[in-house]
Image (cartoon, rainbow, N blue to C red):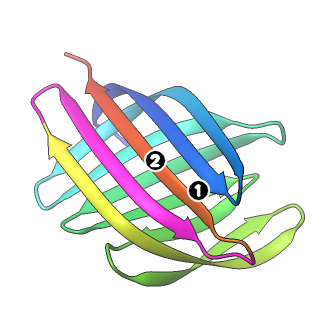
Amino acid sequence: MTGKDCEIKIISRQTMGRDRETIEETYKGSFLDRGEKKYLSYKRHTEDGDVECLLSIGKGIITMNQHGKINSRLEFIPGKKTENKYTTSMGNMNIPVFTRGLSIKNGQEIIEIMLDYDIATTEAIHTIMEIEVKLNK
């Protein structure tokens, strides 16, 4: 994807029961603004191999696609529960996600995205994900 080079910082805070985990990751990526829709692409390096990630950001919806060692498509729509596909080397899963909130702040050089959602497994995993995109000049 051609677009503007950027640095992406993702902070993910997950709570499952009494267990809490915070993960902070930084990636180099590309940002493309198509007016009503914006796209953010980057590559994650995992223990199992590389994963290409694409976030499609629209009005009131974010779609996250991953391809590589993990293949998934997750939809985040505030106030809605979505059924999502997730495929790993361990098998295929359908993951229900309930999106509590979504916030997007567009700045000239920095874009801030906040997702608040539950992964509705046997014991719900509450996640707050903050994504900061710094556009290179």
Q: Position of residue 38 (x, y in %)?
A: 24, 52
> In 3D space, how far apart are the residues under numbered discs 2 and 1 (Cα atoms)?
16 Å
Q: Decide if residue 71 is on the left or right side of residue 53.
A: right
| Residue 79: quarter of image | bottom left
Residue 4 falls within the magenta-colored stretch:
no
Q: Position of residue 74 (x, y in %)?
A: 52, 68
Residue at 21% over, 29% down: 110
Residue at 17% over, 44% down: 105
Q: Position of residue 133 (x, y in %)?
A: 32, 32
Q: Are marks 2 and 1 in contact (CB under 8 Å)?
A: no
Q: How many marks?
A: 2
**Residue that mark 2 sits on:** 129
**Residue that mark 1 sits on:** 66
Name which residue type carries label 2.
Met
Q: Decide if residue 36 is on the left or right side of residue 18.
A: left
In the picture, the quarter occupied by the C terminus is: top left
Secondary structure that dominates the magenta span: strand
Q: Nearer the viewer, mark 2 or mark 1?
A: 2
Q: Which of disc 1 and disc 2 is earlier in sequence?
A: 1
